[in-house]
């Protein structure tokens, strides 16, 4: 492949300097007739890339995997993972890391092509991706970014001009994903499984240098590494819960060390509040249901701790004790972050001991009355309590009076409280029926206007603007029983 460098690429390849067992060098598989479907101008500019040039033929060739930018050393990364509780050796089966872009501000981001063809880890798969799921990841990841939730981002989606065979022939596509890194809990599980402590130490040191340089001089830096990941995941999962996001497949290979949301296969946003809500067609036991996400995150972190044990202490028993102590703080850290966020959603600036009781009481009422999660907080924020019948029940009235009394006990004014609520409660989310509407128009009819309009209103979900009103509407009754599928 030729290598071009007139587009603003400034690539490093630090991961390729790790032991060769961590990855496989391989070029992307060229595609027949690439066509740029969507491109993220703002993200491209922040990366230091030339927006105009990347949209031209030579730039699209790189985004499609037909060419490589100068400085690229493409690799597929190896990792493992507990998938629905079962351990499996894995790796990038349809993705390639083409390099790490160093931005004008000195930040480092992985640039990965998803759907770029077979790799040594494809396990019989074709290494390709279909247009619908790649557009879905673009929409949801950018919506998550706008919601203020740590996430990988999407730079572009290129249609390949080739069919991908699943149940039927589907249009193929390549997504360019941008991430702080693709180091996962499963990466550590993979390296630990190789049985070489030195390799584990190399990965841990690399991770610390890349993501947590402030702990580099700590006496037990690897214990601090575990603590940092626990903290970031507690922060992340609390934010998921606050907006009703359901990841759908919280395997350990889908938990990043950086604390970013990654892999938007069967994800969805909850409409009716229900802790048992599951959308993924493959999660038949509800392992990754909305209400299970915090304990599953804790379970995944315990698997990371197991992988790190040889680095924590020479005495295995003491290593286990140190790891258990750190992981045991996850529920408390999560609960504190979640409750702080829920206070914001109710316009509460200070803390009182009964705040959790107040929040839990509202959630129970929402579950009982099958109320929409996002629109309940939206209505309270806007002080519009006439449009939902359950707001007129005695039990909600009682709760509402307790909330008013609680809010009035704080020194901040009602307008201050309402502003906090507006900053904490999105007016809109990427509702599942709207996402499906956009994907159907794009995939079935080649109409991308529906998706463009959706992306535009999702750019500022806290705007409470008039054009967002229609996107706050609930799905039609016919949309009941909605299921999502892994992005293949």
Image (cartoon, grey):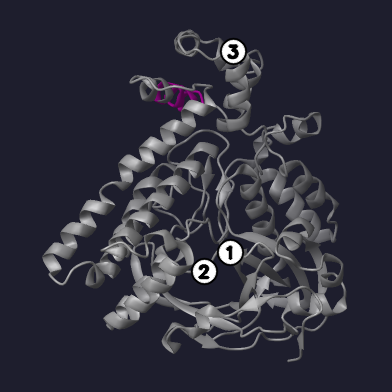
Q: Position of residue 310 (x, y in %)?
A: 23, 73
19 is higher (above) or lower (below) than 368: below
Q: Residues within 10 Å of mark 1 (few under 14, many from 20)?
A: many
Please tell me whether mark 2 sits on a helix, a strand or a loop. loop
Residues tagged 2 and 1 counted as in contact (Cβ below 8 A): yes
Q: Which residue is mark 2?
A: 182
Q: Which residue is mark 3?
A: 414
Q: Position of residue 370 (x, y in %)?
A: 52, 28
Kindly indicate the quadrant of the structure image that contains residue 338. top left
* Main secondary-structure element of the magenta-colored stretch: helix
Marks 2 and 1, how far apart at CA: 7 Å
Report the residue at 57% width, 48% height from top.
Answer: 268
Rendered image: mark on residue 179: 1
Marks 1 and 3, how far apart at CA: 40 Å
Q: Residues within 10 Å of mark 2 (few under 14, many from 20)?
A: many
Q: Residues within 10 Å of mark 3 (few under 14, many from 20)?
A: some
Q: Of marks 1 and 3, which one's residue comes earlier in the chain? A: 1
343 is higher (above) or lower (below) than 404: below
Left or right: 325 as drawn, with respect to 369? left
Marks 2 and 3, how far apart at CA: 44 Å
Can I make out residue 51 in this image? yes
């Amino acid at each position: 492949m030729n290598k071009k460098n007139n587009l603003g690429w400034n690539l490093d390849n630090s991961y390729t300097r790790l032991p060769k067992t961590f990855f496989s060098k391989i070029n992307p598989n060229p595609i027949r007739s690439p066509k740029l479907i969507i491109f993220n101008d703002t993200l491209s500019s922040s990366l230091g890339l030339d927006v105009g040039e990347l949209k031209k033929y030579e730039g699209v060739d790189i985004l499609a995997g037909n060419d490589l930018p100068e400085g690229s050393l493409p690799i597929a990364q190896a990792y493992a993972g507990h998938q629905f509780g079962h351990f499996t050796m894995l790796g990038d089966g349809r993705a390639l890391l083409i390099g790490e872009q160093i931005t004008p501000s000195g930040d480092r981001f992985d640039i990965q092509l998803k759907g770029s063809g077979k790799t040594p880890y494809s396990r019989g798969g074709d290494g390709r991706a279909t247009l619908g799921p790649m557009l879905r990841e673009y929409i949801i990841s950018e919506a998550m970014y706008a919601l203020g939730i740590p996430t990988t981002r999407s730079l572009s989606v290129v249609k390949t001009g080739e069919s991908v065979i699943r149940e039927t022939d589907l249009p193929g596509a390549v997504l360019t994903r941008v991430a702080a890194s693709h180091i996962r809990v499963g990466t550590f599980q993979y390296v630990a499984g190789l049985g070489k402590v030195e390799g584990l130490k190399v990965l841990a040191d690399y991770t610390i240098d890349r993501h947590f340089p402030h702990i580099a001089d700590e006496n037990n830096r690897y214990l601090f590494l575990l603590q940092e990941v626990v903290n970031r995941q507690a922060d992340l999962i609390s934010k998921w819960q606050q907006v009703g996001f359901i990841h759908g497949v919280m395997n350990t290979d889908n938990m990043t060390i950086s604390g970013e949301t990654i892999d938007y296969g069967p994800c969805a946003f909850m409409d009716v509040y229900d802790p048992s809500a599951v959308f993924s067609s493959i999660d038949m036991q509800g392992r990754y249901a909305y209400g299970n996400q915090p304990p599953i995150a804790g379970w995944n972190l315990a698997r990371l701790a197991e992988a790190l044990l040889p680095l924590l202490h020479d005495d295995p028993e003491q290593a286990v004790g140190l790891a258990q102590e750190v992981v045991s703080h996850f529920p408390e850290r999560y609960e504190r972050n979640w409750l702080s966020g829920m206070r914001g959603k109710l316009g509460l600036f200070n803390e009182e001991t009964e705040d959790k009781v107040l929040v839990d009481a509202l959630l129970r009422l929402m579950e009982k009355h099958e109320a929409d999660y996002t629109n309940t907080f939206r209505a309270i924020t806007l002080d519009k309590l006439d449009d939902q019948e359950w707001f007129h029940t005695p039990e909600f009235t009682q709760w509402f009076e307790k909330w008013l009394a609680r809010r009035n006990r704080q020194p901040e004014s009602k307008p201050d409280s309402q502003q906090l609520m507006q900053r904490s409660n999105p007016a809109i989310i990427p509702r599942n029926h709207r996402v499906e509407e956009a994907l159907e128009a794009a995939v079935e009819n080649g109409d991308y206007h529906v998706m463009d309009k959706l992306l535009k209103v999702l750019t500022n979900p806290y705007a409470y603007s008039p054009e967002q009103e229609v996107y706050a509407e609930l799905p039609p009754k016919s949309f009941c029983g909605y299921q999502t599928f892994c992005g293949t």
